[in-house]
Image (cartoon, helix red, strand yellow):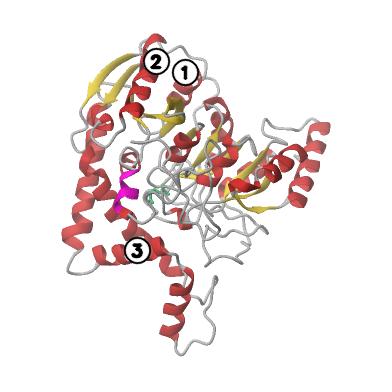
Amino acid sequence: TDAFLARAEQHAGLNSLITLDAERARAAACVADQRRAAGTAARLTGVPFVHKDIFCTKGLRTTCGSKVLANFVPPYDAHVAEQLDQAGAVTLGKANCDEFAMGSSNENSAYGAVRNPWDRDRVPGGSSGGSAAAVAAGIVPFATGTDTGGSIRQPAAFCGITGLKPTYGRVSRYGMVAYASSLDCGGVLARSAADCAEVFRVIAGPDVRDATCANRPVDDVMATLDQPLRGLRIGVATPYFGSGVDEGVGATAQQALKHLEELGATLVDIPLPNAHHAIAAYYVIAPAEASSNLARYDGVRYGHRSADPRSLDDLYSRSRAESFGAEVQRRILVGTYVLSAGYYDAYYLRAQKVRRLIAADFAAAFAGVDLIAGPTTPTVAFKIGEKSDDALAMYAADVNTVAVNLAGLPAISLPAGFSQGLPVGLQLIAPAFAEGRLLNVGHQYQ
Ligand code: GLN
């Protein structure tokens, strides 16, 4: 723990952490030592990590990257935090992230942008950018993250690490601050698929406190890590290599697929005919749900409260205007618009229909293949500031990741190699609850 705390200090310039609590970490490490001495240690006992600052941690400030929650100290732990605590893992602190997980570059944090350890002038990706940068810089062996439209996979790709987004409902959302509830998914970023598997089996599983959490046992993902890949059928998602995808990124992903072929997999092209509608559908549905979820920050119950309000309405509007960042305000406006009486059918309802088509595309593909593959992102990590004034260019960074969330499927991003000296990620997508297959292929590949 001391070594990792020193490492955090050494790499403070990355701005990957919002809160570091050395005292708390050392106390947890002592408990871990006692467990080890008593012979009751689990596999993660004593292993340091950080939580994306969107998981509630009892007694430890949880900001969601927002000014609204600058002084919020949760009175309870998220399910994920509780599980890792019980396993004896040691929380060093809370990782920086885009405000309420809205973003693809980690430039939307009220606590400043995070820098990519491979090139400090570039973004680490978002919204779990602090988690990814901390793992890539060796500040922690793993970090938790959340993925609503790519926020685990995209930063993992940009930072050259492995990121697992489980099936929707496989990991309880209890205590994970809501962005878009039908898409939000807790998961893990680590240096390898095997490390992701160690964490996944601790955080996954039923929890009655989240009504959408699947009530089914978790597969033994450790037992299948070493399975050979002979006979595995991988569908190459042709739209994921389409327009907007850098040549170097596409070529690097193709090379990675070739390597999987050498390991015994067979490759077949698959069409995913509705893939090009995913961004449009996602950026209607996610803001709609966000506008509803974020209504709770009213300046009354918790969070920032404006001084000297003139009326109750004034308290609401000023508290929110003073503390939400520009991107969060944009999402609330878009979400409110698409849900409003005159536009609901034209936007929200239509987006839900497209969502169904996208899920059907995947279902049809999985009738013939075991996994679907393509580059995680269309480009390598871009420069800080490069897209921050252009919301649509920023949204386009999610072109290969959002469909997975719309369909509720599990996916992993694996380090696939480099283009222009920067990491490229290979995304693998599996049928629901087949995380074991993703981790197996990731482990064999690595
Ligand atoms: N970039 C996407 C968004 O801003 C995804 C974010 C996420 O997965 N949390 O909505």
Give residue 375's position: percent from left, percent from top.
35, 30
- The tag on residue 260 is 2
Q: Is residue 396 magenta?
A: yes
Q: Secondary structure at mark 3?
A: helix
Give residue 309's position: percent from left, percent from top.
49, 86
Amino acid tagged 3: Arg
Which numbered disc flags the more N-terminal residue, 1 or 2?
2
Check disc 1 and report the residue beneath it: 445
Helix, strand or loop for the magenta stretch, by majority: helix
Up-down: is 62 above or below 363?
below
Give residue 423's position: percent from left, percent from top.
46, 30
Which quarter of the rendered picture does the N terminus lie within?
A: top right
Q: In the rendered structure, are the residues bearing label 1 and label 2 in contact, judged by CB atoms less than 8 Å apart? A: yes
Mark 1 crowd level (few <14, some 14–19, many ≥20, 10 Å Cα): some
The CA span between labels 2 and 3 is: 42 Å
Q: Is residue 344 left or right of residue 414?
A: left
Q: Which residues are magenta?
A: 392-397
Residue in front for this viewpoint, 261 or 8 = 8
Q: How many marks?
A: 3
- The tag on residue 330 is 3
Residue 137 in sight here: yes
Mark 3 crowd level (few <14, some 14–19, many ≥20, 10 Å Cα): some
